[in-house]
Amino acid sequence: MPEPERPPLSIWQRPERAGRGPAPEHSRASIAAAGLAVADAEGLAAITMRRVATAIGTAPASLYRYVANRDELTALMADAALSEMPLTDLPTDAGWRADVLTLAERLRALYRRHPWLLDLMMRPGPAMLGPAAVDYLEGGVAALSELDAPARTKLEAVSVLTGMVSMFVKDELGAGNVSEQAQAANAAYLGSIVAAGNHPHLAAVMMQAAADPTAGGAPDPGQIFKRLVVGVMSGLLAPPALP
Amino acid sequence: MPEPERPPLSIWQRPERAGRGPAPEHSRASIAAAGLAVADAEGLAAITMRRVATAIGTAPASLYRYVANRDELTALMADAALSEMPLTDLPTDAGWRADVLTLAERLRALYRRHPWLLDLMMRPGPAMLGPAAVDYLEGGVAALSELDAPARTKLEAVSVLTGMVSMFVKDELGAGNVSEQAQAANAAYLGSIVAAGNHPHLAAVMMQAAADPTAGGAPDPGQIFKRLVVGVMSGLLAPPALP
DNA sequence: ATCAAATTGCGATCACCGTTCGCAGTAATT
DNA sequence: AATTACTGCGAACGGTGATCGCAATTTGAT
């Protein structure tokens, strides 16, 4: 029997080094760090096999000795970035809402520091949890430890929280990356659609938003973020108002 | 003054046809439909300029007469797919929770019918709303019309709902696309990490999930979906429990 | 000590991608 | 009739992820 054709394991289960040939000149960690630096400086589009290879001083083909394909390279980078998030100080004694908010705000800060990480997290494929992702999950469940909700519910809540933060920052950064002209053009476009008469509810909303009774300018994103996080998590985890 | 170098408008504001030359042999709608069919049959990776061009029977370069780049092509496709969602029957008199749940379930069904649409919605760039996206927004706000929350709050709620549904289906489809072997390998990997002793909360959660008192197998995703949607939206929109 | 096996770095190369350019043909405007 | 602006598109460019085979190197077994 000539080997039953083993399926290739994910990079997290494959050993980094096999003990036979010459010692590799690089490590997964150093490659991830190099990619992280390139992505921070030039964006995710700059993460090509050639670019990262030259960043660590090798030929492109050599990278494939450490990584099966580009997706594995980005997975390494994502886990490296995730590992920057502090987690060991949770839970505090300030209550689960405060702890969850802390976690959410740290994730938002991480996304804003490494915008490319957000793009990676949004990628279609199945989520292959690296060590840092597992730590993050542990931190999230830990923040909810004072609650006695079912285990599945807590996992779902952490998942929803993560997704919500990701979507929030995606909108936040996406909106920030358009020129003032384009933004004005888009507003005009939306206005022209609403002016056509269908979309009455949208028209009402835009009217109300324009004639806002509170402060004049745009509301503080941080404030909105807080409200959303607390609202969503309360809806998922707070007891449904016992009498 | 030689023209002030106009910035190029988005595809939704550009007229489809200028009135001078020969009549175009195709339309944005027909191109979007062709792309939609290709993506349904072969996935988003099959959406290349060449592939779509041959699908409508032209040379690759001709596509650029209709679309400035690949992103505009996918935007066309996304809006075409979104327009499949029925919206005119909302709100009903069953209450905003039921209506919002209906909307969410329709979006989930749409994502499952066109998995590539989900990938497009997750793309980094700023959201350029096409006509169907505006209709969707109108439908979402309409479903909340019986509430007297501030306009901004309603928009936020629709946005969060959309994001939550997207994330949910992403996880759902992502998990479905891994072989049973890979799933088992992943479980083993996670188990080995948890067995190392750190991650006590995760260990507890996995233990509790394994020895589940309720039904044996996996819980119904549809049920979870319902619970999450109602929970999240209640947390954002329900009054905070007055005494 | 010797040798076979396994592994590393990598030059060369493949197929494919998005996009551009210029040209011939065509229809509306002047 | 002349001009103008558009259409379709053949050909090409620079860049991409990935593969293959080879020489060099180190380990483990004999």
Image (spheres, coloured by chain):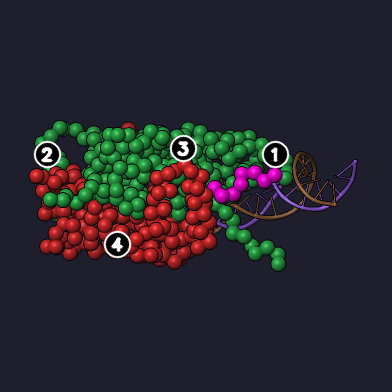
Chain colours: A green, B red, C purple, D brown
Q: CA distance from mark 2 to mark 4?
A: 41 Å
Residue B223: assigned label:
4
Image coords of residue B97 (percent x, y): 18, 57
Whether the residues at callouts 1 and 2 have beta carbons within 8 Å, the answer is no
Assign a secondary structure to mark 2: loop
* Circle 2 chain: A
Question: Going 49% across and 55% down the picture, which residue do you hit?
Answer: B187
Q: Earlier in the sequence, mark 1 or mark 2?
A: 1
Q: Quadrant of residue B39?
A: bottom left
* Circle 1 chain: A
What is the three-letter code of the residue carrying label 2? Ala
Question: Going 36% across and 45% down the picture, which residue do you hit?
Answer: A141
Name the residue carrying label 3.
Answer: A83
Q: Earlier in the sequence, mark 3 or mark 1?
A: 1
What is the three-letter code of the residue carrying label 4? Gln
Classify 10 Å Cα crowding around label 1: few (below 14), some (14-19), many (20 and above). few
Q: Is residue A13 magenta?
A: yes
The answer as to whether the residues below labels 1 and 4 share one chain is: no
Name the residue carrying label 1.
Answer: A23
